[in-house]
Image: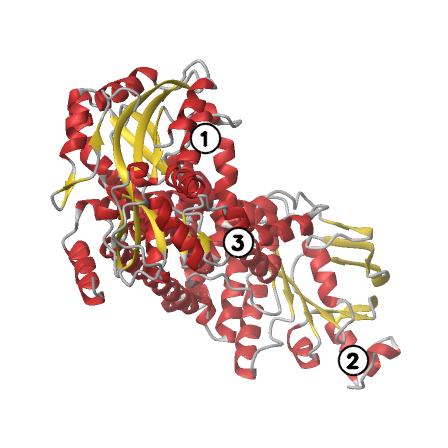
Amino acid sequence: MDFAAIFSAAFALIVGLDPTFLTIVGLSLRVTLTAVLVAALIGLPLGAALALARFPGRSVVIVCLNALMGLPPVVAGLFVFLMLSRSGPLGSLGLLFSPAAMIVAQIILVLPIVIALTRQTVEDLWGEYRDHLRSVGLEGVRAIPTLLFDGRFALATVLLAGFGRASAEVGAVLIVGGNIAGYTRTMTTAITLETSKGDLPLALGLGLVLIVLTLAINAIAFGASRIGARYAG
Amino acid sequence: MSPTRRLLIASGFTAALTALALAQTTTAPPAGTRFITVSSTTSTQDSGLFGHILPLFKAKTGIEVRVVSQGTGQALDTGRRGDADVVFVHAKAQEETFVADGFGLERRPVMYNDFVLIGPKSDPAGIAGTKDIAAALVKIAEKGTAFVSRGDKSGTHAAELSLWKMAGVDLAARKAAWYREIGQGMGAALNTAGGMGAYVLADRGTWISFKNRGDLTIVVEGDRRLFNQYGVIAVNPARHPHVKTDDGQAFVSWLVGPEGQKAIADYKIEGQQLFFPNATQAGA
Amino acid sequence: MRDVASILPLSVDAVSFLGSGRALIEDLSFTVPAGGLTVLLGPNGAGKSLTLRLCHGLLTPSEGRIGWAAGAHGRAKRHAMVFQKPIMLRRSVEANITHALAAAGVAGHERRERAHAALARFGLTDRATQAARLLSGGEQQRLAIARAWSLRPELLFLDEPTSQLDPAATRQIEELLAGLVAEGITILMSTHDLGQARRLADRVLFMHRGRLFEDAGAGAFFAGPATPEARAFIAGELIW
């Protein structure tokens, strides 16, 4: 099979909205968006709280979080696998080999990024806003909504970074999802499988979608920082 | 909270929820779907057999079968941990141990296919056309031509190792640069062999459905020793009370029954039958 | 608001403040009664800014106490502060004001009314929807004052409000401050600009090296300062 034929077959899958293809793309988006949403709901307030709080061992926590940002996905996957296996502590939930398990694994991958980068963003902003916010009576927890809102453009790029990491990884979702056709098969696990089967058009088509997605994420991030610049001056 | 702020937050949430809802409708099976989890081998998965027979089973029983495909060793481990309801693999000795250890209920033979030795068309070891797999392997070892091994404790890997043993080649003693263990599935092994111009042992099903053959071709086939038997076992609920024994047994019974056996025989790629049902054959 | 008991006079009683092991403010005592504009005058490093922060409650005295006539605690504390470099939130001009009002616990519909009033009062109505951080330096400081004003303070603290502005913007701010005093708002502001002190002050608190050297009416202070340090400062000599 020559290169041009692979490319045109891949395009046919995308343009023709092949159902298998759409299922895979849809599942990937559902899993990753859910993971990022949950990570945002937990990580944004937590990161902001960490930025404002002073307690013994705080720098240890920050160093650990920064290190966790580079956590190898397969390790996160292995951890979730051991937890969720029927023989593991949370086995009774019966979540292994399900999208829920993949979402959990991706949350573990994305959460440190969200918390660590939110902490950085909010701490910088707090340094700038502290006098005024304290002057109008916003301190501690009460300052968090203002800081998160005013950091919205930087924080949007934080979430996009998390989305990028989660959508591009294959190790964790393969281990905990099992790559079950039509159920836990995502773009990355499908690419792995289809490449090994030698079905290069499907693998390439999914690869193209991932590339477009990555491009879109970066375009949105760029746009966000531009709009942010308009407000930030 | 200012109106613009409220609007921004609201629109952010709406966008996220819409995306979720969209993804949900395109992918999610309806809640409460009846399903079983089957751990099986990469060769059955990569060959496309499941894509053919599982919809037939679902249409008949309403049970969705979720297949996690791994090497045979791994697939049996998944069953041992209770993470699957049924295991469907091809390594008879290991399967019998699995049942003897109390992890499985009963091993039922399902079908067979055969292994073929794949190699580059240029045939550097000069073995093309022979029917004697043992002699072919000896020649590869003597000439030191590249050979790709799955190296992943799969059924195919186990079969390959026993063939080397049968051929009298002591891999541990002769293991050298020409013998390459990649620790991956069948398709990946074929891709690797194609890329390196190496020999590789493959199951015929994966080979027939493999699309990226490039310069590879069958060099040795037809030896009785290349026979590859598949068996199916429901996981023992005495070990793992949560397993879906009834639905799992329904799948086992269907596979070894006339409908399943016919479905397997009907699966063809480019006119070639990939698997040969033999549930009723004694001793299979 | 005027039916509530006044928080003034503010009394600063024997206040000291330690920073990195040494006294930055030492034994400071003065009161600020209602009305007029009091200037904290002195060279850089005299402790003017620290004094304002201590009074506003951003810092806690190491010794001594800051007292108010009536309950100045609670959410709406009835004294507000404007900083040397205006702190603008990353929002529109109007939202900068409504945010401060929300923080003070003002209800939604009233926030908008009061914000509009503040924008009109300080000539910022046509800037309402613009990003606050894109205003000029003078406009930003005007917005900071409008934002503080919208909180309806009895006492307004200003920390070198014009030190980063050009002469035209400075004059504009000074006119605004005179207007606020006329409106009945009491002002305590710091400056190291002698000319500004002459133009605005009703009363001068002269500080040097963390201590209060003189507390006098503006006329008396400029006519004949009692201490050699104040005399030197007025004479334009570098004191340190």
Measured from the top left, where is residue C231 in percent x and y? Answer: 83, 81
Residue drawn at the location 45% of the way across and 18% of the way down: B100
Residue kind at label 1, given as amino acid type: Asp
3D distance between C-alphas at marks 2 and 3:
56 Å
Q: Chain of mark 1?
A: B
Q: Which residue is at the front of the view, C60 or B192?
A: B192
The kind of secondary structure element at disc 3 is: helix
Asked if marks 2 and 3 fall on the same chain, the answer is no
Q: What residue is pinned by disc 2?
A: C223
Q: Which mark is residue A118?
A: 3
Residue drawn at the location 86% of the way across and 62% of the way down: C22
Camera-nearest label, 2 or 3? 3
Measured from the top left, where is residue B104 in percent x and y? Answer: 40, 19
Tally the marks: 3
Residue kind at label 2, given as amino acid type: Ala
Measured from the top left, where is residue A40 in percent x and y? Answer: 45, 46
Quadrant hosting residue B222: top left
Residue kind at label 3, given as amino acid type: Thr
Q: Is residue A192 visible?
A: no
